[in-house]
Image: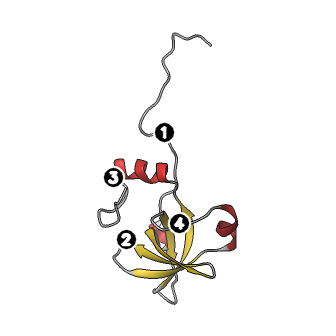
Amino acid sequence: MSNDEPMESTEEDVTRVRLPNIKENEMFGIADQLLGASKIRVMCEDGVSRVGRIPGKIKKRMWIREGDLLIISIWDFEPSKCDVKFRYTKTQASNLSKRNKIPKNLDIF
């Protein structure tokens, strides 16, 4: 490997992060308030504040704090509730913000 070759870094190849799948009722949300008992209040991109459930799979792997950008999945049978599917790190959230992937009403990054 020679030092003559420049390091390739394009805007697209920086990070491959998961985006919400609209077909599966997923959307962006911001963690508003921790309620305890694996529940959290989430401000969703459609302007509705919902109670979100943090599944054990995510609860064990990553901590969710107020102000975090999340992907949530709305319940079909009770639209006022949702499940947390994914949490972005601060770096990933600011990167998505720079690329204009986050809706304007949620963009605090």
Q: Earlier in the sequence, mark 3 or mark 4?
A: 4
Q: CA distance from mark 3 to mark 4?
A: 23 Å
Secondary structure at badge 2 equals loop
Secondary structure at badge 3 equals loop
Mark 4 is surrounded, within 10 Å at the Cα level, by few (under 14), some (14 to 19) or many (20 or more) other residues, namely some
Marks 2 and 3: in contact by CB < 8 Å?
no
Picture coordinates of residue 25 (x, y %)?
47, 74
Residue 14: give its label: 1
Mark 3 is surrounded, within 10 Å at the Cα level, by few (under 14), some (14 to 19) or many (20 or more) other residues, namely few
Most distant residue in the left direction = 104
Residue 45: give its label: 2
Q: Residue at x 51, y 14 (%)?
A: 5
Picture coordinates of residue 82 (x, y %)?
52, 79
Q: Residue at x 61, y 64 (%)?
A: 63
Residue type at the position of mark 2: Glu
Q: CA distance from mark 2 to mark 1?
A: 25 Å
Residue type at the position of mark 1: Val
Position of the N terminus, as image quadrant, is: top right
Picture coordinates of residue 55 (x, y %)?
65, 74
Q: Earlier in the sequence, mark 3 or mark 2?
A: 2
How many numbered circles does the render carry? 4
Q: From the image, state whether disc 3 or disc 4 is nearer to you.
A: 4
Say which residue label 4 marks. 65
